[in-house]
Amino acid sequence: MVQSKTELFDKKLVKDAELFKALAHPARLRILQFLAETPACITGDISDELPLGRTTVNQHLKELKKVGLIQGHILGVKTNYCLDPAKVKELEKSIASFLESINFENYKCI
């Protein structure tokens, strides 16, 4: 049986990589910013707020939902989108922890 290359790494690194990958596009970062700037969940079309087509925005929303950074609840014919505060806090801790693990204080490039 073929083993996935990610299985060769620590589970925390794999989980962090999945979260970080979800941030690896400016449209996804903008979606997170937009949702954070909005005091309530957004019902309707987020593509009105981005310079991208609806299908492309939906793909980015799907990636953010897959890692749990946003939630989408269907209300009739529209979807209600909002951040998942607990998951965003988890992301914040993961980034801080990762950066601490690669502390550059004593790093010297030869």
Image: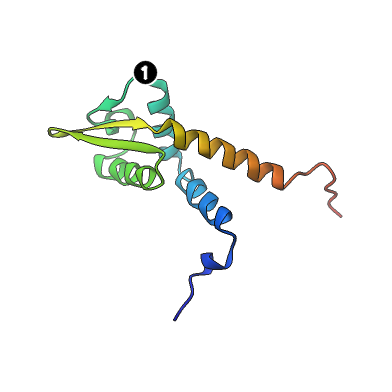
Q: Secondary structure at mark 1?
A: loop
Residue tagged 1: 39
Q: Position of residue 50 (x, y in %)?
A: 34, 32
Which residue is at the far bottom?
1
Q: Position of residue 29 (x, y in %)?
A: 45, 36
10 Å crowding of disc 1: few (<14), some (14-19), many (20+): few
- Asked whether, in this view, residue 22 is left or right of residue 46, the answer is right
Which residue is at the far left?
76
Q: How many numbered marks have been drawn onto this rendered protein structure? A: 1
Q: Position of residue 48 (x, y in %)?
A: 27, 29
Name the residue at 82% across, 41% down: 105
Name the residue at 12% across, 32% down: 76
- Asked whether, in this view, residue 51 is left or right of residue 2, the answer is left
Name the residue at 25% across, 39% down: 54
- Coloration mode: rainbow
- Asked whether, in this view, residue 8 is left or right of residue 2, the answer is right
Q: Nearer the viewer, residue 45 or 89?
A: 89
Which residue is at the far top?
39
Name the residue at 44% across, 81% down: 1
Q: Position of residue 70 (x, y in %)?
A: 37, 37
User: Where is 91 relative to 14, above or below?
Assistant: above
Amino acid, disc 1: Pro
- Asked whether, in this view, residue 44 is left or right of residue 41, the answer is left
Q: Nearer the viewer, residue 57 or 7?
A: 7
Which quadrant holds the C terminus? bottom right
